[in-house]
Amino acid sequence: MLAFPTYAHVFFPKTENTTVVTDQSKIQTAEFKIYGMTCTGCEEHVNQEVNKLTGIIQTTVSYENSNAIIEFDQAQTNIEEIEKAIEKTGYSVTEKKAIK
C-alpha cells in the first residue's frame, strides 16, 4: 500500500477530450486551489471527474501545488460546475479564479 501513490495512475483509464469549440472567444482558463490531495492518484481522481464535463479542453492537476488549472469552453460549462466536479471527489476547493 505504501507504493500505491506511485502507480495509482494505472487504475484510471485515459480520457480523451472531444470538445468541439465553436467560438474561440468563449475559451477560458481558471485555477482552482484544492485542499486534500496527497499523491498522483489524487491528481488522477480529480482529472477523471473534471473530464466527464462537456466543454473541458485541457486539465493540469498538481497535488504538489495543490491546484488544478483547467481550460474550458464557457458556452458548454462554467467555473461553478467544475468546482462541483472537483468537490465530488472529496477534495475541497479553497479558492478559484479566472486566469484569462
Image (spheres, grey):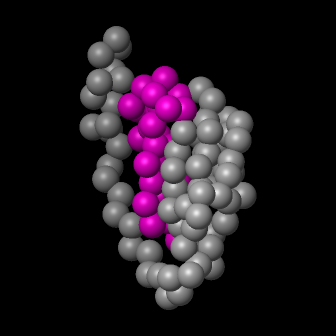
Q: Position of residue 91 (x, y in %)?
A: 62, 34
Q: Which residues fall within the magenta stretch?
A: 37-66
Image quarter hosting the C terminus: bottom right
At x 54%, y 73%, the residue is 27
At x 45%, y 28%, the residue is 64
Residue 95 visible in the shown view: yes
Q: Position of residue 93 (x, y in %)?
A: 68, 40
Above or below, comparing residue 86 to residue 76 in the picture = above
At x 33%, y 21%, the residue is 4
Left or right? Give the position of 6 relative to 46. Answer: left
Image quarter hosting the N terminus: top left
Above or below, comparing residue 40 to residue 60 in the picture = above
Left or right? Give the position of 99 relative to 2. Answer: right
As for residue 65 lying within the magenta part, the answer is yes
Q: Position of residue 79 (x, y in %)?
A: 67, 59
**Total number of numbered labels?**
0
Residue at the extreme bottom of the image, as rendered: 22
Residue 88 visible in the shown view: no
Quarter location, residue 77: bottom right
Q: Position of residue 87 (x, y in %)?
A: 66, 42
As for residue 26 lying within the magenta part, the answer is no
Question: 99 and 81: which one is in front?
Answer: 99
